[in-house]
Image (cartoon, coloured by chain):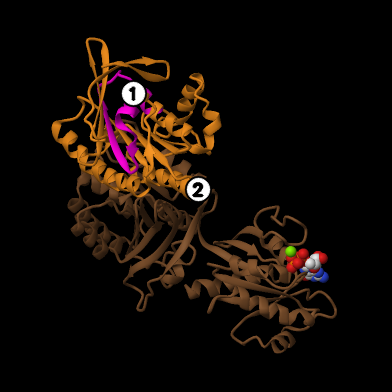
Chain colours: A orange, B brown
Amino acid sequence: MTKYDLGIPELDKALGGIQSGTNVVLVGPPMCGKDILVKQILHAGLRDGDGVILVSTGEPGESIFKWCEQHKLGIENYKNRFGIVDCVSKTLGMDVSDTQNIKRASSPVDLTGIGVKISQFFEQFYVKDKLSKARLAVDSLSTMLMYSNLQTVFRFLHVFTGRIKAADALGIYVLEAGMHDDKTVATLKKLFDGVIEIKEENGEFFIKTAGMGSTPGKWMKYEITGPKIVIKGD
Amino acid sequence: MFETGIPKLDDYLSGGIPSGKSLIYHTQPGVEGDIFGMQTLYWNLHKGHKGVYVASNSAPYAVKGRFKEFGWNVEKFDQLSIVDCFSALMGADSSERYVVSNPEDIVAIDDAISKAMENAAGGVIVFESLSTIMDHCGEKETLKYMEKWKKYSTAYDNVVICNFTAWPYAKSTLKRIKELFDAVITISGIAKRVIFGQYYGVSKVNWVAKSQKRSISFKVLRPGGVKIFIPKVLVTGPYNAGKSSFIHAISSRAISVDRLGTTVAMDHDFIDHKGFTADIFGTPGQERFDPLLRMLSGEAMGVFLLIDSTKPSTFPRAKKMLEMTRAHGLPYLVVANKQDLPDALSVNAIRKKMKIPESVPIISASVAKKQGVFEAFETLIDMITKAI
Ligand SMILES: Nc1nc2c(ncn2[C@@H]2O[C@H](COP(=O)(O)OP(=O)(O)O)[C@@H](O)[C@H]2O)c(=O)[nH]1
Ligand SMILES: [Mg+2]
């Protein structure tokens, strides 16, 4: 059975690897490093030989690559395995076309287009490049929910969490804590197998996983160091 | 009658869409189906018809940019208007002729669409995404208004064409959609671990007496749009018949992959011609490669048998190769090559000598002079698409 690592040694050790076909929601308040954590998990995938897809509703594709270069993540070694679905550039009025790594949806409203681009990357990775593992991150569901109602986003996720299962891939979906009502959170959570939760208390950050391993996770303290989060103890 | 501009589809629809009728491109999520509506709109604008594009997912400039991806400049058509059901969602201004101030209000959308349909009387109305309007305004409400828009289209001699993504809506909604539209074109992918390969088919068309439910695979080219795609066509025939030359003459790329002068590895190339594309594979001619030949021919959809018309001594070998490559019933034709040479046998003489049935076309060709090459391609494509 294929397993996936998050790229955070303490968590990976506790989890013993995540089953393929798992969909995980990453919940946390703003300014706690969710974006960094997402990139860290994707970077771990690139190092493991996975195909990696990032659906970005907040940052244009180019600036994600720039960020990776600035932090010397060695992305250039993996460029044919890293695809970004950029939902931002076209809404900013930029006259940009697709590149090998960046496919652009018209807007965060354009779930049809986002779905097409995700599928095209999956096809490229599995059929053309013959990869056997892939991870998809959607950063973030909260932005999607600003432009489409809960039911619409739910239907979209229903389809794509299913595709993650069929492809034995790993799906990570970012949700801003505190931005949505309880019903929204409860409805969406039905779609996911696991949760990564982060929180801030008195200026300190904590992370916890649930639903992915045999043992329920406990809160671990972490710090943000450059392009990654580092566990500092319980 | 309005053509769809989608290769082969107009044949399946008996020429196109009669005015007053509606058609939906009903697409599985993840498959690139919205290009179908765009292609139909562009085709009709190009023919001089009026057109309306109801943009619900993209800003108007992004719409124009998407058309450009396929090589279609829509800015030159004055008779195109856009109903902007998008900008207001982003809080952006719009300078389009029809702007919907609240895209979540079906009454506001109807107001703009009704006007646009009247002004575009005798034209084509294309919805970028009916599903998005349903998502914003409600499934039942939107479909109720679709009934109204259909009535308008009868009054104004429009046709209504919708792109639609078949998200997991309520069964009753999906059923209602199939009833509502006069034609339903289903666009899907082959799903295993991931979706690959795309095809479309006519699920419903109520103006054609005896419609056949067939599916045909397609590719989306940039530029170019929707093209029928034949995944595997073989070129076989004896050594020196002109197989490599044939592939080179027909291919859309500059260099063919003939690795070692004479064909040891496979020639492989891509053809893009008049709405049809195909991956074409040349088999080696020499007998020592026969085991390979059988392997290469798996999943082929049609065969060109190349022969050197001046070398009747190679005809038995040609027939044997045909037998090896051709699964039972697979469409094939004979390309009688080197007709430019004085001692070339005529098509009739070849048919007799090789005992080729009358039903199998023999195309007189001189591949070196590019004669008969595209005739052969078009003829075989026609046979393949009829056989599907
Ligand atoms: N005269 C004449 N020669 C041709 C024609 N087509 C191909 N040839 C020549 O026939 C030879 C064999 O062609 P090639 O394509 O390599 O054959 P293959 O072995 O079947 O791949 C080459 O010297 C070509 O130039 C044609 O239409 N007329
Ligand atoms: Mg050859």
Towards the viewer: B311 or A59: B311
Q: Is B230 on the left or on the right of A92, as rendered?
A: right
Q: Are marks 1 and 2 in contact (CB under 8 Å)?
A: no
Q: Earlier in the sequence, mark 1 or mark 2?
A: 1
- How crowded is the residue under tag 2: few (<14 C-alpha within 10 Å), some, or many (20+)? few
Q: Tell whether circle 1 marks a residue whose Cβ is less than 8 angstroms from ligand 2.
A: no
Q: CA distance from mark 1 to mark 2?
A: 31 Å
Residue A34 is situated, as x and y percent measured from the top left of the image, at 32, 24
Which span is picked out in magenta? A11-39
User: Compared to B34, does A220 lie above or below?
Assistant: above
Towards the viewer: B323 or B219: B323
Towards the viewer: B359 or B137: B359
Q: Quadrant of ligand 2?
A: bottom right
User: Compared to B294, does A139 lie above or below?
Assistant: above
Q: Is residue B368 visible?
A: no
Q: Residue at x 25, y 46 (%)?
A: A155
* In magenta stretch: residue B228: no
Q: Residue at x 62, y 68 (%)?
A: B234
The residue singled out by tag 2 in the image is A130
